Image: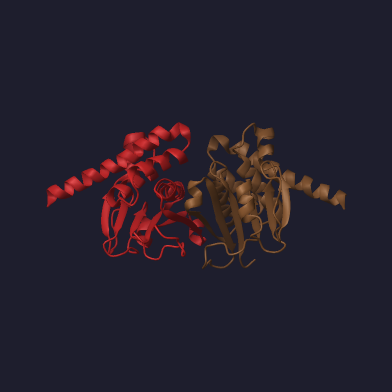
Chain colours: A brown, B red
Amino acid sequence: MSRLEVRLSGEGGQGIILGGIILAEAAAVYGGLNAVQTQSYGPESRGGASRCEVVLSREEIDYPKVILPEVVLVMNREACVRYAHQVRPGGTVVVDSTFVDAVPETPGRVYRVPITRLAREHFGRDIVANIIALGVLAGLTGLVDRTSLEQAVANRVPPATREANLKALDVGYRAVAELLSAAASDS
Amino acid sequence: MSRLEVRLSGEGGQGIILGGIILAEAAAVYGGLNAVQTQSYGPESRGGASRCEVVLSREEIDYPKVILPEVVLVMNREACVRYAHQVRPGGTVVVDSTFVDAVPETPGRVYRVPITRLAREHFGRDIVANIIALGVLAGLTGLVDRTSLEQAVANRVPPATREANLKALDVGYRAVAELLSAAASDS
């Protein structure tokens, strides 16, 4: 892997930025890669949009911004319209189907997962949706290994919520397993 | 202000990254500027070093990395050795004198504030040192206005800690007032 670009998008309150920090720390601090994690705030952020970019590489990272990502997470409709099509051909687009029905045409492979609904069902609240999303992204793409991701989650979330967040990560990985097994029996 | 660069540095656990997020959100979401906030993770991050960069501008920000910052915060000795001299001539270098005795030669103006000691004295714990530091930086430089900073702090910290963090911000501003009044009576 010379360079792998990830974009996480949604709105304020969905934990997009914490998701990016955890992903970058999993890859870098625990996984031995270089990582840069960036948030850009412009007029759209005053409307509540939230976007976070992570670049991973075995080499030094000269250019820290995402050019055309391999992996995209969209957590609401606006983010879907804006970012689902900005992905490398064959790249991975994960859509939170709790909030998004229609996905515009995209060169990526689209995976619909009811991320926030899973958070509500398993934990009775939306707040861990970002961690479920990380489990989904990592499970689908292998962009970081699970042990590193668990360590980064455990290190970054408040200690009192550590156990719930590690369970949320597991919910994400299991959602991927179900998705893939459903896809296999469809074919 | 066409472009203003800020570097926050220290070690894991000092809340450097959250400090950068709050600063960027204060400037952008509440202050109407554009902001980009970046963390880079390399081999030094596996040794525990933490660094966060914020670029503010009225214009769009094409290049998101810090080139030579106007404002630098160093929260431990290693960060001081590495970053205190990387500052524009006449720029502001804030040093947490709790951990740093000697400051290497630098083209910036150095302000020594016992940030972590203030956190311990006022709150009995280190954890709000990052918010005190933001109050110091903003009080010294005016790089964001106080109301915006208070809103960003209130929005980003856990609700149960909101009051303590707003007090911590005030401790930072008051430390600046004392520093400036001491400087005035020295001269």
Quadrant location of residue B1?
A: bottom left
Q: At 41% across and 53% down in the image, what residue appears?
A: B33
- Whether A185 is drawn above or below A119: the answer is below
Quarter of the image for the N terminus of chain A: give it.
bottom right
| Left or right: B138 in relation to A128 | left
Looking at the picture, tell me which residue is in the foreground, A105 or B110.
A105
Image coordinates for residue A115, horizontal then vertical, percent: 67, 42
Looking at the picture, tell me which residue is in the foreground, B182 or B144.
B144
Q: At 44% across and 55% down in the image, what residue appears?
A: B35
Task: Say whether residue A144 is visible.
Answer: no
Task: Say whether residue A78 is visible.
Answer: yes
| Left or right: A111 in relation to B116 | right
Q: At 13% across and 47% down in the image, what residue appears?
A: B185
| Left or right: A171 in relation to A11 | right
Q: How many numbered discs, if any?
A: 0
Image coordinates for residue B142, horizontal then vertical, percent: 30, 50
Image coordinates for residue B43, horizontal then vertical, percent: 51, 61
Quadrant location of residue A68?
A: bottom right
